[in-house]
Image (cartoon, helix red, strand yellow):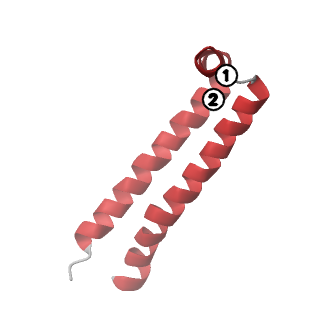
Amino acid sequence: MHTLPWLTFFGWATVINWLVLLCWFLMVTLGRQWVFGLHQKLFGIPEQQLASLHYGGMMAYKLLVLLLFAVPYVVLRFFITA
């Protein structure tokens, strides 16, 4: 079985998802007032609860990216193709 297409897929998927996570983090930290104001208007959730939801969501997203994309990439890159 050829592993190069899978290696390419997992590599780019990892990079793209880390960029999404970085954008999310920057929006929440640098544009905090705008993001939280928008979410408070839409959902009526207090700021403390919004902060915990955002950071909990980022944690879950990071774990999923690691488990679903980064770990398979590392395994294919260093153990299967070696």
Closest to the observer, 10 or 37: 37
| Residue denoted by label 1 | 32
Report how many numbered discs are placed on residues in the image: 2
Instruction: Determine whether label 2 and label 1 are within 8 Å by CB.
Output: yes
| Residue denoted by label 2 | 28
Left or right of 21: which side holds 50? Answer: right
Please tell me which residue is depicted at 42% across the width and 51% down the height of the picture: 15
Q: Secondary structure at mark 1?
A: helix
Check the picture and name the quadrant holding the C terminus. bottom left
Q: Amino acid at mark 1?
A: Arg
Left or right of 36: which side holds 16? Answer: left
Please tell me which residue is depicted at 53% across the width and 61% down the height of the picture: 66
Closest to the observer, 24 or 54: 54
Query: Crowding at label 2, few (<14), some or many (≥20) Cα neighbours within 10 Å?
Result: some
Percent from the top left, x then y, of residue 61? 55, 50
Please identify the quarter of the rendering in which residue 40 is found. Answer: top right
Check the picture and name the quadrant holding the N terminus. bottom left
Whether residue 82 is visible, yes or no, is no
Percent from the top left, x then y, of residue 18? 49, 48
Q: Amino acid at mark 2?
A: Val
Q: Secondary structure at mark 2?
A: helix
Placement of 50 over or under 69, stated as above or below = above
The outermost residue toward the front is 44
Closest to the observer, 2 or 44: 44
Query: Crowding at label 1, few (<14), some or many (≥20) Cα neighbours within 10 Å?
Result: some
